[in-house]
Each structure stands twice: as C-alpha cells, then as structure tokens.
Image: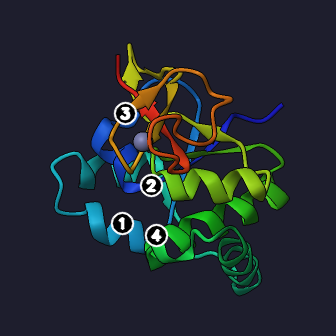
Amino acid sequence: MSDPAYVLDSTAFYAGIPYQGNGRYYTTYLVLEEVKHHSVGSSLIHTRVQVTEPSQESLGQVKATAAKTGDIRALSQTDLSLLALGLDLKKSEGGVSLVSDDFAIRNVAEVLSIPLAPTSLKGGEWKNTTWKMYCRGCGKTYTNPKLTTCPICGTQLVRKASNS
Ligand SMILES: [Zn+2]
C-alpha cells in the first residue's frame, strides 16, 4: 500500500498542510503562483509538496466536463489545472484526494470521480466537513441535503461547507 496522495488548491495551503503523517502532496505551478507569497508557503512547499504540470489530455477532459456541468465560468485556469492534475494522479497513482472547498471544483471533481477531501484542519488532520444547502437567491441555508430548490424563493440550491 502506498501513502495517501493529495492534490492541494490554494485554500488548502491557507488552511495549513498537515506536517505529520505520510501523505504525499501535489499541486500545480498556477496554484504555487497564488500561494508563494503567503507565509505558510515556501518552506513547506519545498519539503512536502511536489509541483507538477497536468497533461493536456486531462486538461481537455476537465474543460469538456466543466462545460457540460455549467461550472466552467466559475473555474479559473488555476482551478482547471488542479482538476486536471487530480485526474492525472487518479490514473497514475491509483488513489488521490483533491483538497478544495471551492464549490465548482468539488462539483466537477465529483462528476470526474476524483475523490475529495475537506480543507479544514483539526489536530493535524483534515476533518470532515458538514455540508449545508445554500440559497443564492435569498441566502437561506438548509440542513437537508436532499433539497435541490429553495422552498421559499425557488432558486436552485448549492452545497456549501459548514464550519460549525
Ligand atoms: Zn431562496
């Protein structure tokens, strides 16, 4: 059995990378650009995180999937590179988890069957995130994950990580 592999987005760097354990951490050059000025950045990145460029093939597959789900407008080049790297590592490493709390990233990752890990750190480990359904129309949140449209205003609900 190999160590668990994680693909990190910028929010994962801000939340903090677990410094214990045997996890292998990957990110892309575009993510590195975003986080390199952050205090958490440099030393940890060089010792624990492998920076890799995703394949063009995976990038194309991610873009096509995001276009289908309608998430493409919410995804930056950085987000797309991260998803593509997740797809590459899923093929080459077998097991990989994408660490992001961005809703559009998580949505596309689910369609591509890339396993997801939450970003909130607790005791050196990422803890599980509780999901809530959030209405962009009226701002109400619901705890029932099966609700898809807002009973108050009819807007389609989005899934959101809950910090409580
Ligand atoms: Zn609503």
Q: Nearer the viewer, mark 3 or mark 4?
A: 3
Q: Nearer the viewer, mark 2 or mark 4?
A: 4
Task: State the SS at label 3.
Answer: loop
- Give the residue type at disc 2: Asp
Residues marked 4 and 1 touching at CB (< 8 Å): no
Question: Where does label 2 land, which residue?
Answer: 9
Near mark 1 (Cα within 10 A), the count class, few <14, some 14-19 or many ≥20, is many
Q: CA distance from mark 2 to mark 1?
A: 9 Å
- Give the residue type at disc 1: Leu
Task: State the SS at label 2.
Answer: loop
Beta carbon of the mark 3 residue lies under 8 A of ligand 1: yes
Question: Where does label 4 land, which residue?
Answer: 74
Question: Where does label 1 land, which residue?
Answer: 32
> Percent from the top left, x then y, of residue 15?
32, 37
- Give the residue type at disc 4: Ala
Beta carbon of the mark 1 residue lies under 8 A of ligand 1: no
Relative horizontal placement of residue 40, taking residue 155 as reference (left or right): left
| Number of marks in picture | 4
Q: Residue at x 45, y 24 (%)?
A: 20
- Against 113, is 115 above or below? above
| Labels 2 and 1: the sequence-earlier one | 2
| Labels 4 and 1: the sequence-earlier one | 1
Q: Nearer the viewer, mark 3 or mark 1?
A: 3
- Give the residue type at disc 3: Lys
Question: Where does label 3 land, which residue?
Answer: 140
> Percent from the top left, x then y, of residue 48?
45, 46
**Toward which corner of the image does residue 82 lie, by quadrant?**
bottom right
| Labels 3 and 4: the sequence-earlier one | 4
Q: CA distance from mark 2 to mark 4?
A: 15 Å
